[in-house]
Image (spheres, helix red, strand yellow):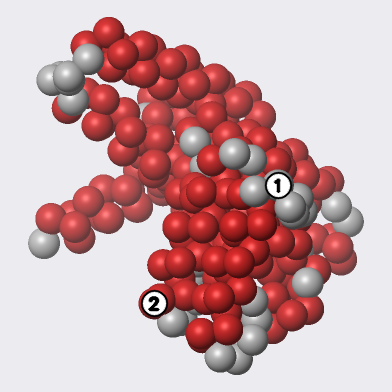
């Protein structure tokens, strides 16, 4: 799957996906990571085949894949030398994470982001200064995934409001109710667990003058964009930060309108 020839990579993706689909192979972390990486392959045919294969494989392994997202972040930040060499720059890692998130259901995506908060952000907030300074890649990637999840959930809420017509109103109503329940659980976790961790991280990262502090602030701004007043309430103890985030959001909206 890391062969220089695109045709070989594509054939490997298709063959391995079929073996997993027929239960000849287990979807172990390393295989899951490589499928996600191939979905961001520079060759369009390989990327398309891998994205399709990943979706098919993930449909039957949602829980397992959600558990592998933290490992994917670690692998791409040096935990897997071969993957890190090929997908080690931030520009290449973004599409890998996007492919992994796109394959997960909203419920499992929430599970994956909760694990990132617990296993990446939490330990970083408590790490010694020297260790924290070496975690910038993992932190930036975890925060990127959290922002992507917030945008996807905000888009899903907007879609639910827009979709008034449906072939099966009862099924649509059930889906919306389930979506609202998941949304409330995700919001509660964000407000009670993730935001306090982000605020503590921001304070430490700024004190150490680490660039990843900007990623924390971008994630706080995305949370504010998604949940407004509820996030404002959490930021009540830091009114200056709240004003800065509001200003940045206003500037972003103005730029989009131009």
Q: Position of residue 152 (x, y in %)?
A: 39, 42
Label annotation for residue 23: 1
- Image height of 235 relative to 17, above or below: above
Please tell me which residue lies in front, 82 or 60.
60
Quarter of the image holding residue 188? top right
Q: Position of residue 183 (x, y in %)?
A: 45, 23
Please tell me which residue lies in front, 214 or 41.
41
The quadrant in which the N terminus is found is bottom right
Quarter of the image holding residue 150? top left
- Image height of 133 relative to 153, above or below: below
Residue drawn at the location 27% of the way across and 55% of the way down: 252
Please tell me which residue lies in front, 22 or 153.
22
- Kindly state the secondary structure of the residue where label 1 is placed: loop
Residue drawn at the location 77% of the way across and 44% of the way down: 119
For the view shown, which residue lies furthest in the top direction? Answer: 170
Please tell me which residue lies in front, 131 or 151.
151
Mark 1 to mark 2 CA distance (whole Å): 28 Å
């Amino acid at each position: 799957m890391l062969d220089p020839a695109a045709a070989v990579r594509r054939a490997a993706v298709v063959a391995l996906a079929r073996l997993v689909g027929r239960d000849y192979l287990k979807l172990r972390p390393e295989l899951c990571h490589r499928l996600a990486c191939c979905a961001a392959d520079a060759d369009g045919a390989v990327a398309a085949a891998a994205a399709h294969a990943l979706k098919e494989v993930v449909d039957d392994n949602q829980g397992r894949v959600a558990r592998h997202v933290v490992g994917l972040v670690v692998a791409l930040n040096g935990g897997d030398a071969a993957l890190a060499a090929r997908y080690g720059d931030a520009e290449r890692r973004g599409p890998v994470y996007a492919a992994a998130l796109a394959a997960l259901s909203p419920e499992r995506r929430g599970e994956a982001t909760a694990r990132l908060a617990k296993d990446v952000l939490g330990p970083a907030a408590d790490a010694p200064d020297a260790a924290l300074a070496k975690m910038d890649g993992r932190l930036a990637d975890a925060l990127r995934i959290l922002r992507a999840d917030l945008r996807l959930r905000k888009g899903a809420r907007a879609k639910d409001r827009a979709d008034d017509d449906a072939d099966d109103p009862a099924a649509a109503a059930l889906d919306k109710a389930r979506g609202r329940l998941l949304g409330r659980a995700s919001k509660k976790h964000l407000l009670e667990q993730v935001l306090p961790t982000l605020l503590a991280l921001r304070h430490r990262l700024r004190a150490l003058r680490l660039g990843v502090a900007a990623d924390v602030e971008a994630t706080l701004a995305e949370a504010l964009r998604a949940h407004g007043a509820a996030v404002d309430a959490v930021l009540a103890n830091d009114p200056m930060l709240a004003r800065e985030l509001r200003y940045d959001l206003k500037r972003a909206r103005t730029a989009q309108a131009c």
